[in-house]
Each structure stands twice: as C-alpha cells, then as structure tokens.
Amino acid sequence: MIGRWLTQRKLRSFKGVSRVSLWFEARLTNLGRIIFSTAFAAAVFGIDPNQTFALQLAAGLFSILTVALLLSIRWRPNITVSRIVPDTVTVEHPTSYSVSIRNYGSKPEADLVLADFLKTKYPVAVDFMRASRSHRDRNVNWFDRVVGFPRWLALVRRSRGARLEALNLPAIPPHTTINVTLPLRALRRGKLVFTHLELRRPDPLGIFLATHRIACYGEVVSLPKRYPTPRLDWHSHRHFHRGGLTQITTVGDSEEFVGLREYRPGDPLRHIHWRSFAKRGSPVVKEHQDEYFDRHALLIDTFLGDSSDTDFETAVSIAASFILCERPTDSILDLVFIDRKVWRLTTGRGLSNNRQVLLQLAELNPSTTDNFDQLADYLRRYLERLASVIIVATTWDGARQTFVNELQQKNLRCLVLRACEAPHIPSDTHANAQGGHPNTVRPSCVAQDIARITIAAGRAVR
C-alpha cells in the first residue's frame, strides 16, 4: 500500500512537470527560451544583494516577457480548420493525412504554425509498476531507471498512439483556403483519437507564441504490424458444410435461404417459411445449399501469464501476418480468440474481407485469466470440419501441449508459434512442426523467425 501511494505521488509530480514543460515548449520561441533562461539565471544571482546588476537584468527581462505574454493573448484569428484522416493505418508504417485551413479574415495570416493533438491517457500506478518490472533500457542511466521518468514518458507516448510534429504554414491570403499534409506514424495498434488542432503565431516581439485552439475530433484505427510470409502449402482436406458459404460461421444447423419446397414429415419447425405458409395455407420449408471446401483455423491464445506486453504484441502481429498470407481460393480461415467471450471470425471466399478481421485484431487485449480450456472446447465442436490448425500463444504449458497432441491424434495437422524473447537454439523446425512443439518467434527479430518457421509450416500443414 505504501509503495503504491508513493508511486501515485510520483506520477502526479511527473504529470505536473510534463505539463509545465509542454507549455514552455508550445508558447516560447527560440528567442523566448533564451530570454527566459537568462532572466532565470540573473534572478538566481540577484539573490545576493551585492549583485545589483544581475537583479536589474532579471527585472528588465521579466518585464519584457510579461509584455510579450500580454501581446500574445490578444490574437483571435477568423480561421477554420478541418482534418481529413484515413480510416486505418498500420503500426510503424509511415503515412500522412491532410488538413484544410480557411482564412475568413480581411487580412493575410503569416508565420503560422499548425500543431495537432491526440488524446492522452496518463498511466496509473498499476501500469507504471508493471512496466517497471518489464522495462530494461540499457541506454537510460541508472538514475533515470530508478526515478522512472523516461519510462513514464514512454507510457504517455504509447497512450497517444503516435507522435505528431508541428508544421510551419505558408502565408494564407484573406478568404483563401490552403491544404497541407501532415506525417503520421502509428506507435501502437488500436484506436487513435484526435482531439483538437492548434494554430500558433509569434507575438510582435517574437518571444511568445499566441495560440488559437480549434476543436476538431477524429478517429483512426491502427492495424497490427504485419510481416511478409512465404506461401504456405496449405493442407487440402475438403469437408461437407451444411448450409453453404454464407452460414458457415453459425453454430448448429444453417438457416440459409436458397429455395422453397413442400413440407415433409420430420422437417424442423424452424425451417418453415412462415410468410409462404400464411399465403398458401400449407407449410413450406426452406432448402439449404450444401458445399464442400477447405477450412483452417487460426487460434490466438490471449492469456498473457508471465509474458510481457511486447510478447503479446508480437503474437498479434504474427496472427495478422497469417490472415494476409496467400491461401487457396477455395479455402476459408477462422480466427478464434477470447475477448470476454469466444469469437470466431471467418474470412475467405467472399465471407468477410481481411480488413474486417484486422480491425478486430487491432482492438484485441491480453487476458489475465487463463481461459484456454474454454477456447479448446469451442474448437472441439467442429474439429471434424477442419483441415489444419495454427496456434499462436505467448505462454506454453502441459494443458496446451495436451490439446495439440489431441489434435494430432485426430490426424489434424497443427503449427504452433510462441512469441517470447528466448535464446534461439537451432533445431529441426520440421520435426518441431510435426511434433506439435511450439516454434519460438522472438520479438527482437520477428521477420527472420517467421520466414524460417513458415517455410517448415508449409510441410507441417500439408
């Protein structure tokens, strides 16, 4: 309790220091920073009564700063700003968006700076203490590691989701609209929320920046980072699927409407087409379209356990890479995971596009409860219809290995990938894949490990 209380007090002080630092960074020009630093140093020396010149210098400089601050308050431009952002971006993939600025005033506006802002969620004590256990930065000196301010800043930047740089604008003539492009590089997956834009202009003395804030809400979904994967030789094992393509994601019997016929004794009541029954006065039932096709499952184990957030992000990126992996045109892929309940998203053969599945992965959170038994029970419901299974996890234990052995006893090919930063020991990846043992994918070199494993995966799921 005492440790958490001290951490909360520390976080409050970090928040205050950060806000003061951001205020000086946003409101002072380079000249203003020099004048303020000189005034502060002169004030320190002016404490000595014998240093009358330092005291006079400090008083004069602070007077200039006060006048410049008052001049900056009076700026109220007649300008509107609108932001046009893409629907989705990809983590660590450089992109851009546009901002439209309209000057409704009768005078030109020059020397403007445009700054955009994202919603900031300051870390709480639990998140900060958890990050302190997993944070290992050799580039940070021992004092900063003990205090934790750089770690706090890293958490704040991650909560924003991207780092936005201020942009110098060209002069805007009266009654004119200009369009500018701002760079955007997402730092994490999930939703990025834009809150407002800010226009800045130096005061007549060039010391303070006058600011004009414009509320402008916007949202962008940052998709998981993906890695190139070689083409897999997917195992072909066509199964019967009652109800055809459009209803294969449902549990139980399908209810796809493909035609009508007369009622026959033994037909389920829920298959009766009630509108036709009401018109004709005799029961009419719906017919189903039956098809055979390949079906594969990609299972994500969201239980974090003792693994780090970096391991979980790597697992999500691995899953996203396999979602976009080239597959036969007559096959479908089920993405199965737990997020408060079991979800199954199906893609392929026109059922759903990959983008919709990636949007779900973008919002996926790790679980602190081990629900793997529930996930395995759900998959057991339709194992007989699957051709192969790919399992992506961050933790591995006896229960998970037992499930993989069960899959292999049913002659179901299985590829297991575990995201963890473990020393790489060269081994027979083909034997690992055939034996159901997890293949390690290290967060520090994901691309190399995926390229090595997926080559063996083609043989594993063949």
Image (cartoon, grey):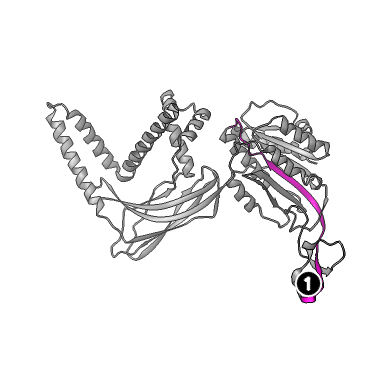
Residue furthest out toward the right: 265
User: Which residue is at the front of the view, 31 or 50?
Assistant: 50
- Residue 305 image position (x, y, % from top left): 61, 32
Queried whether the magenta region covers residue 303, the answer comes back as yes
Q: Is residue 246 left or right of residue 225?
A: right
Give residue 323's position: percent from left, percent from top: 67, 47
Total numbered labels: 1
429 over 234 or under it: above or below: above
> Dot 1 surroundings within 10 Å: few (below 14), some, or many (20 or more)?
some
The residue located at (51%, 45%) in the rendering is 186
Q: Nearer the viewer, residue 125 or 220?
A: 125
Q: Is residue 244 magenta?
A: no
Q: Secondary structure at mark 1?
A: helix
Left or right for 59, reference 21:
left
Looking at the rendered image, the quarter that the N terminus falls into is top left
Q: Quadrant of residue 145?
A: top left
Q: Residue at x 82, y 58 (%)?
A: 290
Comparing 204 with 155, the one in front is 155
Residue 458 seen anywhere in this rendered image of the structure: yes
Q: Along the horizontal axis of the image, is 46 left or right of 225?
A: left
Residue receiving disc 1: 277
- Seen at 19% across and 28% down, the residue is 45
For the point 80% across and 48% down, which residue is it? 385
Observer able to see residue 232: no
Q: Position of residue 72 (x, y in %)?
A: 25, 50
Q: Which residues are magenta?
A: 279-307
300 and 80: which one is in front?
300
Residue 308 on image: x %, y %: 57, 32
Q: Residue placed farthest to the top in the image?
A: 142
Tell me which amino acid carries mark 1. Answer: Phe
Q: Quadrant of the C terminus?
A: top right
